[in-house]
Image: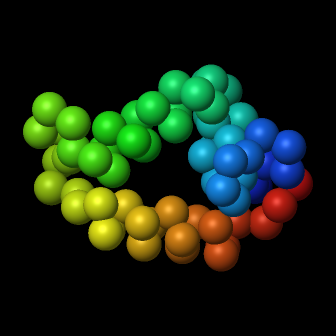
Amino acid sequence: MNRHSSDKWIGGVIGGIARSLGISSGLLRGLFLVFFFGVGGLTLGISSGAMSVIYLIFWITLGES
């Protein structure tokens, strides 16, 4: 799994994950925002701070393609 070099808004993390899973990056970005902001109580106990840390860890550890 690699970050996507052209399909990126911030670091290419979600674009790279979406490409490796074979799904739309827009769909995955939407899901990320739902979990980040906790829309409708769908956070599953994950805070926005934890989501930020998870994203940062992926950004650091995933190589760019």
Q: Nearer the viewer, residue 15 or 38?
A: 38
- Colour basis: rainbow
Q: Residue at x 62, y 24 (%)?
A: 24
Judge from the rendering whether residue 31 lies leftward or rightward of residue 49; answer left or right.
Answer: right
Q: Residue at x 39, y 41 (%)?
A: 33
Judge from the rendering whether residue 22 lies leftward or rightward of residue 56; answer left or right.
Answer: right
Q: Is residue 56 visible?
A: yes
Q: How many marks?
A: 0
- Which quadrant is home to the C terminus? bottom right
x then y, percent, for residue 42: 18, 38
x then y, percent, for residue 58: 58, 66
Rendered position, 24 above or below 9: above
Q: Residue at x 41, y 34 (%)?
A: 31
Rendered position, 29 above or below 14: above
Tell me the quarter of the picture where residue 3 sits.
bottom right
Q: Nearer the viewer, residue 22 or 32?
A: 32
Q: Residue at x 77, y 40 (%)?
A: 7
x then y, percent, for residue 38: 22, 44
x then y, percent, for residue 51: 37, 61
Q: Nearer the viewer, residue 65 or 6?
A: 6
Rendered position, 51 above or below 21: below
Q: Is residue 16 visible?
A: no
Judge from the rendering whether residue 19 lies leftward or rightward of residue 42; answer left or right.
Answer: right
